[in-house]
Image (tube, rainbow, N blue to C red):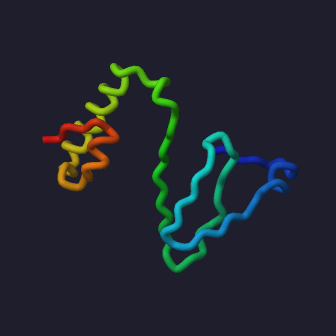
Amino acid sequence: QYRFDSAEVHNMAQHVKARAGSLLVWDQRVIHGSTPNLSDSQTRRAVPIRAFSGTVLSSKRAKGRGEAIARKIRECSFQDQVTETGRQVFGLTLR
């Protein structure tokens, strides 16, 4: 975990409030962090998603990623929890 002791960096910080169930999206290059969770629910959930141009990923690499994702889904027995949209997005054949 990176720590910034610079007052200049801390002075530029922006507080972002979000209600439960909100989605917050930012560019991965943005310095980001959070303060301690003082809410009744002591759980914060995050799902990192990375998006990039399709031209960056060769068809061979895309196929390999899809196969690796499908393998993990089968290992966890999550086949029935993947939506049709999820199958299309990741090119998954799970059965």
Q: Is residue 38 left or right of residue 75?
A: right
Q: Is residue 74 left or right of residue 30?
A: left
Residue 27 location (% of width, % of height): 62, 44
Q: Residue at x 48, y 24 (%)?
A: 55
Q: Nearer the viewer, residue 66 or 44?
A: 66
Q: Is residue 49 above or below residue 60?
A: below
Q: Is residue 7 above or below residue 58?
A: below
Residue 42 location (% of width, % of height): 50, 71
- Say which quadrant the C terminus sits in: top left
Q: Is residue 8 left or right of residue 29?
A: right
Residue at the farthest left position: 95
Residue 29 location (% of width, % of height): 66, 40
Residue 92 location (% of width, % of height): 24, 38
Q: Residue at x 72, y 64 (%)?
A: 15
Q: Is residue 41 above or below residue 11?
A: below
Q: How many marks?
A: 0
- Say which quadrant the N terminus sits in: top right
Q: Residue at x 23, y 55 (%)?
A: 81
Q: Nearer the viewer, residue 81 or 46?
A: 81
